[in-house]
């Protein structure tokens, strides 16, 4: 396995900047995910690492070797595509062994490695099938088999689970995590699904408009988002945002009056005072009080999510949602007294959208 | 690794065997059924004489279909094959008209075809033109060239060699059909047993994957256009030898449609990666027999295209429904 370093990678398609001054690294045996909405440049970045696209600017180092001019086949990487891209006319055995065959491996060695890989992935009984004779999950495993059989330095996975149904996706998430942990493989994984990114990665890089918004562990990104985009993109249901004013250490907005902590006020003072801010609160950090409170909202709709309720509320121009146990039964129009966990709130600059705390 | 119990679809072995049977031989069944139906409607359609005649008729389309298969399998497209066949045939006729030397005419014909194929190939692989745009432009240009060269004239081509190609037989079997068969056998060998064939399929199956695997994609694609162009020349030679004339009315476009239809009916995937020579041959027979039978069944000429179109559409739907590439 190997490390990967990207230095100031920029990719332009005409006037469109798909990837903008992108720098990051993947350590040996690390699982790093590029996550962001469609068109954020994550797949382009992956293609640049693979050598399928050339960067307009910047440097790529794979295993400390400058790799910009090395063709894809010589980079010793393996890629798994969203569509799996299995060869339809080949049986599973040939699909998995194809990369080795092209690299002129000995026939016996190919057979040995293919069998080992298929057994490892639990598809040893499917070697004589053709891709069309497999289920989605099985095809996915064949695509993975084709990648791991070569024992490459680096694995690149481009939305490999997005063609699977929700149930299978959850299973495969866990399987992939176990697989790459067993292989001790360095992985760059691309997805638009923040849950996939959060659950599978050692670190994730959140991207938007071709720019890395934040790199960190799942906890870091979730608990300390660097800006409004990351705060809104990571987490489901998404973080609530309301425009607020701060006067004498107290936050005011429609339906909200909440005192901030000294630490938070210090951070605001250090950052510099603004007329207005954006307050962010995750739905699970809002609780319903039985007693009177200075945060009051009216129930708009209650979603039954099975294990919990997701309650949507509004007051004036503010709309928020919260996650609640099912021991209450709020009615539409009912007024609820709420409490925000002040230590878990986030404050953003209304102009730059940068996190103040 | 502990495998999750994911939903294992299609694990029934009998079902898979049945699907494979249908996929591999479905077009064969269709050809047998259609021959049976036409035979009942008019027994002369399945007489030895007509079958031998049919084997002669299908040759030009047979070459185009084989060329189309090579292109499609590699994920490409060549719309200039039909017109290319007529223009290379016309070039052969003109050179023969001017020199009286049939061998020189055939060499010039093949050379001009290879130039057309190489131009298409270079436009697509080196200059990154879309295959549709490059070969469509080529088709229109070639059509214009035919008009320009002939200027409304009809040239008669009368050569014993061409007569032998069009009317000669080996035993009772038309020479042209044997000529076609030789190329189908060669095509089978190239597709199934050479690196080119394996790589071309891999490119059609997934270009990025092929790139990572280290396949020289431009070279393989270029070679596909060259092979198709060569087969296009063979089609042109047979076509002109059969008609014994060249005329500005020869458009080649219906031949392109028939050739591509035959390739696709025979199981060649339009998105690349899939196809086989035997299937394409059966597709050619299917196209040939419906064309032939509609004449025998005295379908009015103005309605023949409609019926042919409907039958081809039916065959394409049939192929799609039995194909496992869904």
Image (spheres, coloured by chain):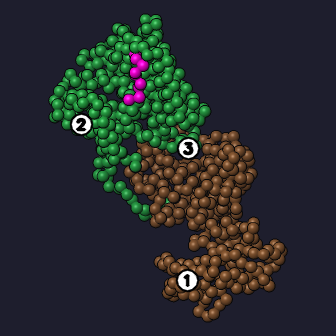
Whether labels 2 and 3 belong to a single chain: the reply is: yes
Q: Which mark is residue B208?
A: 3
Whether labels 1 and 2 belong to a single chain: the reply is: no
Vertical position of residue B271 compared to residue B189: above or below: below
Q: Give the camera-side residue of A157 and A287.
A: A287
> Can you identify the residue that label 1 sits on?
A299
Q: Are marks 1 and 3 in contact (CB under 8 Å)?
A: no
Query: Label 2, label 3: how many angstroms apart (C-alpha)?
Result: 41 Å
Q: Are marks 1 and 2 in contact (CB under 8 Å)?
A: no
Q: Colour of chain B?
A: green
User: What segment carries the magenta color?
Assistant: B246-254
Vertical position of residue A339 compared to residue B154: above or below: below
Mark 2 or 3, nearer chain start: 2
The brown chain is A
Q: Is residue A42 magenta-colored?
A: no
> Furthest residue to the bottom?
A291
Helix, strand or loop at disc 2?
helix
Q: Quadrant of the C terminus of chain A?
A: bottom right
| Label 3 Cα crowd, 10 Å radius (few <14 / some 14-19 / many 20+) | many
Q: Check the residue under mark 2 and report the chain it is in.
A: B
Q: Check the residue under mark 1 and report the chain it is in.
A: A
Vertical position of residue B234 compared to residue B131: above or below: above
The residue shown at (21%, 22%) is B49
| Residue B184 located left or right of residue A223 | left
> Can you identify the residue that label 2 sits on?
B34
| Label 1 Cα crowd, 10 Å radius (few <14 / some 14-19 / many 20+) | many
């Amino acid at each position: 396995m190997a490390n990967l370093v990207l230095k100031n990678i920029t990719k332009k398609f005409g006037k469109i900047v798909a990837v903008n001054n992108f720098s990051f690294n993947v350590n040996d045996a690390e699982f790093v995910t590029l996550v962001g909405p469609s068109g954020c440049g994550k797949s382009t970045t992956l293609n640049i690492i693979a050598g399928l696209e050339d960067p307009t600017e910047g440097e790529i180092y794979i295993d400390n070797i400058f790799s910009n001019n090395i063709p894809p086949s010589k980079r010793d990487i393996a890629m798994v595509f969203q569509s799996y891209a299995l060869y339809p006319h080949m049986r599973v055995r040939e699909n998995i062994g194809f990369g080795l065959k092209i690299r002129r491996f000995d026939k016996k060695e190919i057979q040995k490695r293919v069998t080992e890989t298929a057994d490892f992935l639990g598809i040893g009984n499917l070697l004589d099938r053709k891709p069309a004779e497999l289920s989605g999950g099985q095809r996915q495993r064949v695509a993975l088999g084709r990648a791991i059989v070569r024992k490459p330095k680096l694995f690149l996975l481009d939305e490999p689970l997005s063609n699977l149904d929700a149930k299978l996706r959850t299973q495969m998430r866990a399987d992939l995590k176990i697989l790459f942990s067993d292989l001790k493989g360095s992985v760059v994984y691309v997805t638009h699904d923040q849950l996939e990114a959060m659950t599978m990665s050692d670190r994730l890089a959140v991207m938007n408009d071709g720019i890395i918004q934040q790199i960190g562990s799942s906890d870091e990104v979730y608990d300390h988002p660097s800006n409004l985009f990351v705060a809104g993109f990571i987490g489901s249901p998404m973080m609530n945002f309301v425009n607020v004013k701060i006067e004498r250490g107290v936050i005011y907005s429609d339906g909200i009056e909440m005192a901030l902590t000294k630490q938070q006020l210090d951070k605001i003072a250090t950052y510099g005072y603004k007329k207005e801010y954006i307050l962010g609160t995750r739905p699970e950090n809002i609780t319903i009080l039985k007693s009177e409170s200075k945060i009051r909202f009216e129930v708009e709709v209650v979603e039954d999510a099975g294990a919990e309720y997701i309650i949507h509320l509004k007051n004036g121009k503010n709309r928020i949602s919260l996650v609640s146990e099912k021991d209450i039964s709020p009615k539409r129009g009912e007024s609820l007294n709420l409490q925000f966990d002040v230590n878990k709130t986030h404050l953003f600059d209304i102009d730059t959208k940068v996190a103040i705390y | 690794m502990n495998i999750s119990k994911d939903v294992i679809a299609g694990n029934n072995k009998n079902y898979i065997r049945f699907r494979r049977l249908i996929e591999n031989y479905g077009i064969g069944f269709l050809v047998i059924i259609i021959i049976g139906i036409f035979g009942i409607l008019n027994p002369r359609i399945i007489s030895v004489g007509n079958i031998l005649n049919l084997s002669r008729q299908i040759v030009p389309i047979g070459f185009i279909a084989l060329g189309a298969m090579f292109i499609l399998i590699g994920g490409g497209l060549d719309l200039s094959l039909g017109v290319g066949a007529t223009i290379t045939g016309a070039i052969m006729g003109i050179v023969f008209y001017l020199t009286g030397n049939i061998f020189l005419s055939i060499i010039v014909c093949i050379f001009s075809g290879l130039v057309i194929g190489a131009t298409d190939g270079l436009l697509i692989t080196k200059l990154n033109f879309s295959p549709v745009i490059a070969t469509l432009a080529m088709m229109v240009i070639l059509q214009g060239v035919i008009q320009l060269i002939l200027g409304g004239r009809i040239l008669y081509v009368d050569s014993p060699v061409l007569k032998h190609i069009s009317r000669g037989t080996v035993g009772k079997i038309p020479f042209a059909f044997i000529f076609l068969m030789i190329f189908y056998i060669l095509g089978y060998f190239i597709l199934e047993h050479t690196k080119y064939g394996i790589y071309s399929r891999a490119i059609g199956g997934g270009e990025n994957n092929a790139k990572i695997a280290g396949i020289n994609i431009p070279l393989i694609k270029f070679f596909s256009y060259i092979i198709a162009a060569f087969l296009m020349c063979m089609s042109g030679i047979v076509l002109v030898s059969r008609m014994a004339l060249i005329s500005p009315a020869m458009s080649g476009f219906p031949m392109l449609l028939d050739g591509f239809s035959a390739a696709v009916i025979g199981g060649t995937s339009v998105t690349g990666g899939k196809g086989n020579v035997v299937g394409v041959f059966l597709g050619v027979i299917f196209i040939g027999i419906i064309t032939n039978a509609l004449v025998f069944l005295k379908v009015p000429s103005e309605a023949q295209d409609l019926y042919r179109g409907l039958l081809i559409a039916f065959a394409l739907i049939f192929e799609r429904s039995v194909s496992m590439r869904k």
